[in-house]
Image: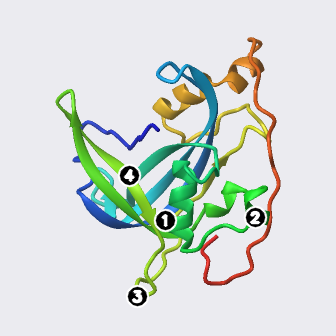
Amino acid sequence: MSLTANQGSSIEPVENGNHHGVCVAVIDLGTQYSELFNKSQPKVMLTWELVDFPMVDENGKPNGFRLISKEYTSSLHEKANLYGDLVSWRGVDFTAEELAGFNIKKVLGANCLVNVVRVTKNSKTYANVTAVAKLPKAMTPKVATYQMLYDMDEDVMPIPEGIADWIKDKIKASQEYIAEMGGQANPPDPSDGQVPVNDDDIPF
């Protein structure tokens, strides 16, 4: 699994530990080929704003919060990283009906604890999301300052404004985007089923 985070060269990576996060973006990365595993898999990226890390603009005025992201294979298999993080985030396992077609869009706006661990590679330090957990009841949920959804099942083009260039590059390497641009690709059959969750104590 690939772990990715915002990598502004002039910004110190987020410190180690658990941080209050709010999911602000669900980005469909399409079907991506992995040279390491020699196969193609559907990928999705989740982005959280870390509400304990406010940002300011060049004039010292509030300008949102630090962002951090994690890339997943779009699978709810019991051994998949997405499955593990979502179960920990919800605080309860999925039902069989939900597993038949859970819509990941439901995490938009949901609060959580994001566990961050710094790693150093090739003399650069990155902040990686290693786990996601349900927000403790003692902590007050926050409202996302914005929400962004990019779903190739709905429309491949155009890629929304506001998505970072390095993420756009990933999208443009997908089978779906290449096919949309006239290349040859074989995108997977989408599953768009959604089962509502009625337990008010489950964040999504």
Per the image, the residue denoted by label 2 is 96
- Measure the alpha-carbon separation of dots 2 and 3: 30 Å
Decide: is 44 above or below 85. above
Position of 132 with respect to 52 (left or right) is right
Secondary structure under tag 3 reads loop
- Measure the alpha-carbon separation of dots 4 and 2: 27 Å
Q: Nearer the viewer, mark 1 or mark 3?
A: 3
Secondary structure under tag 2 reads helix
Residue 30, image quadrant: top right
Per the image, the residue denoted by label 3 is 138
Residue at the extreme left of the image, as rendered: 123
Query: Which residue is depicted at the point 49% across and 65% down?
Result: 22
Residue 22, numbered circle: 1
Looking at marks 2 and 3 on the same chain, the residue that comes earlier in the sequence is marked by: 2
Res 144 seen here: no
In x, y percent, where is residue 85? 51, 58
Q: Which amino acid, mark 1?
A: Val
Query: Which residue is depicted at the point 44% across and 37% down?
Result: 2
Position of 76 with respect to 137 (left or right) is right
Residue sitting nearer the eye, 88 or 124: 88
Looking at marks 3 and 4 on the same chain, the residue that comes earlier in the sequence is marked by: 4
Residue 129, numbered circle: 4
Decide: is 50 above or below 154. below
Q: Which amino acid, mark 3?
A: Ala
In x, y percent, where is residue 10? 23, 40
Mark 4 and mark 1 residues within 8 Å of each other at the beta carbon = no
- Measure the alpha-carbon separation of dots 1 and 3: 16 Å
Query: Which residue is depicted at the point 72% across and 26% down?
Result: 176
Query: Which residue is depicted at the point 58% across and 66% down?
Result: 109
Looking at marks 4 and 1 on the same chain, the residue that comes earlier in the sequence is marked by: 1
Looking at marks 4 and 2 on the same chain, the residue that comes earlier in the sequence is marked by: 2
In x, y percent, where is residue 190? 79, 40
